Image (cartoon, rainbow, N blue to C red):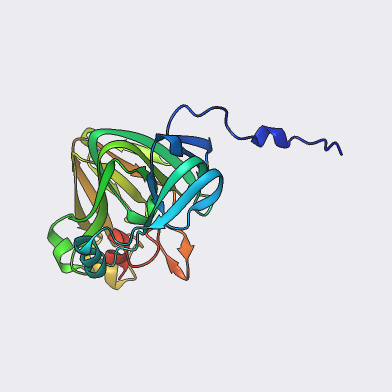
């Protein structure tokens, strides 16, 4: 039977040129011939070939304890084998970058996947108020050489922190570069503003240094009855919203 349609516009990409490639703006194609990857648990939507998915746990006792203390909810699986794997998360936009002996600090649940050559850890970020809020603020720190894919709720903007004082809503900040420092800024309206109901912008993240911060055009989706792109209590958002 011959089917006439325009579906061929959605055909899979041609021969792979890199480990990570965008099939479209909401779906990542990973070519396993380049080696295994770490992916957000449950992010596989399809694969062709012989792929294996392994839960590696928290990545050691140290990381397990950090996750327990911080409430960080990011969970990764190892994907290995042959063929191609397609990854996505809630039809969010996918952004791909290549780190070359570099590092980024990422909101944990915005991470879609990264090359296994990239190391990861949960680290405290910020200062001042950070020590008083839920035991400190945490992010997932990615370091090394390889690909990183993150999700954003819509098309993001990448701001140059060095060009001007830079601030962001905690739910909108996705990640920032190694040369960037983050602190907490409270509602500029002060106590009077908070008594009157506040502005809805009680806390902001203040960035300084050299590098970029990636901002999504959203203050977070609702996942499982909780709001925030960190998916609940984990990471920066959980610390501020908890």
The residue most toward the right is 1
Residue 5: percent from the left, percent from the top?
79, 36
Quadrant holding the C terminus:
bottom left
Report the front residue among 211 and 45. 45
Q: In this view, does 139 lie above or below 154?
A: below
Q: Quadrant of the image for the N terminus?
A: top right
Taking the image as shown, residue 128 lies to the left or right of residue 92, namely left
Q: Can residue 160 be seen in this view?
A: no
Front one among 56 and 140: 56
Q: Which residue is at the front of the view, 170 or 96?
A: 96
Which residue lies at the image location 23% right of the left edge and 33% below the top edge? 163
Residue 1 visible in the shown view: yes
Residue 240 lies, in percent from the top left, at: 28, 65
Count of numbered tags: 0
Q: Is residue 159 left or right of residue 209?
A: right
Q: Position of residue 208 (x, y in %)?
A: 18, 42
Residue drawn where x is 17% and y is 61% of the image: 130
Q: Nearer the viewer, residue 13 or 204?
A: 13
**What's the residue at 38%, 43% (across, down)?**
36
Quadrant in the picture for residue 76: bottom left
| Residue 187 image position (x, y, % from top left) | 25, 60
């Amino acid at each position: 039977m011959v089917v006439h349609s325009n579906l061929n516009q959605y055909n899979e990409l041609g021969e792979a040129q890199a480990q990570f490639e965008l099939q479209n703006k909401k779906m990542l194609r990973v070519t396993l011939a380049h080696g295994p990857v770490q992916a957000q648990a449950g992010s596989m939507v399809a694969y062709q070939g012989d792929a294996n998915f392994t839960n590696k746990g928290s990545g050691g006792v140290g990381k397990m304890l950090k996750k327990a203390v911080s409430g960080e909810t990011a969970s990764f699986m190892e994907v290995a084998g042959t063929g191609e794997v397609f990854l996505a998360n809630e039809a969010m936009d996918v952004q791909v970058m290549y780190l070359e002996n570099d590092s980024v600090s990422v909101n944990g649940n915005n991470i879609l996947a990264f090359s296994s050559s990239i190391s990861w850890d949960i680290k405290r970020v910020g200062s001042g108020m950070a020590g008083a809020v839920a035991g400190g603020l945490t992010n997932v720190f990615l370091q090394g050489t390889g690909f990183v894919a993150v999700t954003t709720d819509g098309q993001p903007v990448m701001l140059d922190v060095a060009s001007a004082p830079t601030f962001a809503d905690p739910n909108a900040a996705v990640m920032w570069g190694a040369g960037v420092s983050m602190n907490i800024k409270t509602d500029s309206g002060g106590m009077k503003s908070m008594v009157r109901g506040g502005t809805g912008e009680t806390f902001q993240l203040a960035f300084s240094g050299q590098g970029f911060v990636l901002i999504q055009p959203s203050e977070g989706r609702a996942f499982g009855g909780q709001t925030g792109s960190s998916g609940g209590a984990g990471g920066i958002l959980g610390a501020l919203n908890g």
